[in-house]
Amino acid sequence: MPPEIVTTLYTSFADFRRAYEVEGLRPAEFDSFGATVRTLRSFIGAYRDLLALVRDFMLPNPD
C-alpha cells in the first residue's frame, strides 16, 4: 500500500492506529475490537447461510 494512504488512514482513524501499531491493542481488547467483531459476525453469517443451503439440498421443501 502506498505510504501516503497509510499516513492518511493513520491520522484519520483511531481504530486504524490501534490495529496498525504493534502495541496498539492489548490481547484482552482484541475480542471486542470493532473490526474483529465485524469479521467474526460476517464469518458466522456466511456459515449459517452455507448450513441453510446444505439443509435445503439434503431436505428439499416438499411443498
Image (spheres, grey):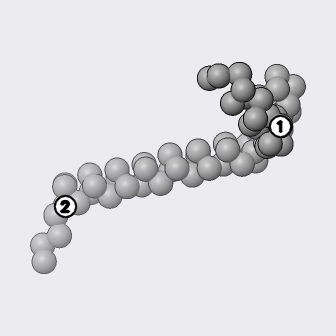
Position of residue 8 measured from the top left corner of the image (x, y, whole percent): 76, 35
Left or right placement of residue 40 versus residue 27 in this view = left
Quadrant for the N terminus, please: top right
The residue indicated by pointer 1 is: 11
Position of residue 20 measured from the top left corner of the image (x, y, whole percent): 77, 28
Identify which residue, 36 or 51, lies in the foreground. Answer: 36
Q: Judge the density around disc 2: few (<14), some (14-19), many (≥20) Cα neighbours within 10 Å.
A: few
Identify which residue, 55 or 35, lies in the foreground. Answer: 35
Left or right placement of residue 57 versus residue 30 in this view = left
The Cα–Cα distance between marks 1 and 2, rounded to whole angstroms, is: 52 Å
- Determine the residue positioned at 75% across, 45% down: 33
Say if mark 1 contacts mark 2, CB within 8 Å: no
Name the amino acid type tagged 2.
Leu
Mark count: 2
Looking at the rendered structure, the secondary structure element under dot 2 is loop
The residue indicated by pointer 2 is: 59
Of mark 1 and mark 2, the one earlier in the sequence is: 1
Looking at the rendered structure, the secondary structure element under dot 1 is helix
**Position of 25 relative to 38 (above/below):** above
Name the amino acid type tagged 1.
Thr
Q: Judge the density around disc 1: few (<14), some (14-19), many (≥20) Cα neighbours within 10 Å.
A: few
